[in-house]
Image (spheres, grey):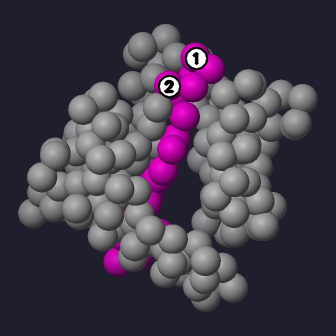
Amino acid sequence: MRIRTARVEELPLLQEIERAAGDPFREIGMAEIADDDPPPLEELAGYQRAGTAWVAVGADDRPVAYLVAERLDGCLHVEQVSVHPDHAHGGVGRSLLDHLAELARSQGVPALTLTTFTDVAWNAPYYERCGFRRLAEAELTPELRAVRECEAAHGLARWDRVCMRRDL
């Protein structure tokens, strides 16, 4: 897999990847997550214009996974990383995270952060294997707290969630 910046004409493909990546949530009793709409094109376009949207592409240069990030409290916050199930378990997500980590290091960014489900195997346990650690409540920055509040308003507080950090 090669990683590159997402192109504006690929944004609908990112939505397709997001929909497909949501399907496994249905199998573990989280149908609401599976049925959640992908980010709107305008939102994805904002990441693309900001240069914080990357895709993993196959030999045909077609995206099979993507990651979008934003600056939050001086760190790079992984807003979303999604891998199409046809390409899951092959290290694609980890490659995207490592790509972001290398970029962050080169810019003097101290860490990557994200929020995720605690008890979903391909969420918090996976990110721990990728070098992230769970943050205690006292470690949450103001902007991470705001993210958690926004997630709660969106209904995500129904399931246990955690903020995580990967120091660089």
Is residue 87 visible from the viewing direction of this image? no
Residue 84 location (% of width, % of height): 37, 70
Residue 71, which numbered label?
A: 2
Q: Which amino acid type is shown beneath numbered disc 2?
A: Arg
Residue 28 location (% of width, % of height): 67, 84
Q: Is residue 118 left or right of residue 96?
A: right
Quadrant in which the N terminus is drawn: bottom left
Residue 130 location (% of width, % of height): 60, 47
In this rendering, the answer to whether 157 lies above or below 16 is above
Q: Which amino acid type is shown beneath numbered disc 1?
A: Gly
Q: Which residues are magenta?
A: 71-93
Give yes or no for residue 121 being in the magenta stretch: no
**Residue denoted by label 1:** 74
Q: Is residue 65 left or right of residue 88?
A: left
Image point 42% across, 13% down: which residue? Answer: 107
Residue 20 location (% of width, % of height): 39, 76
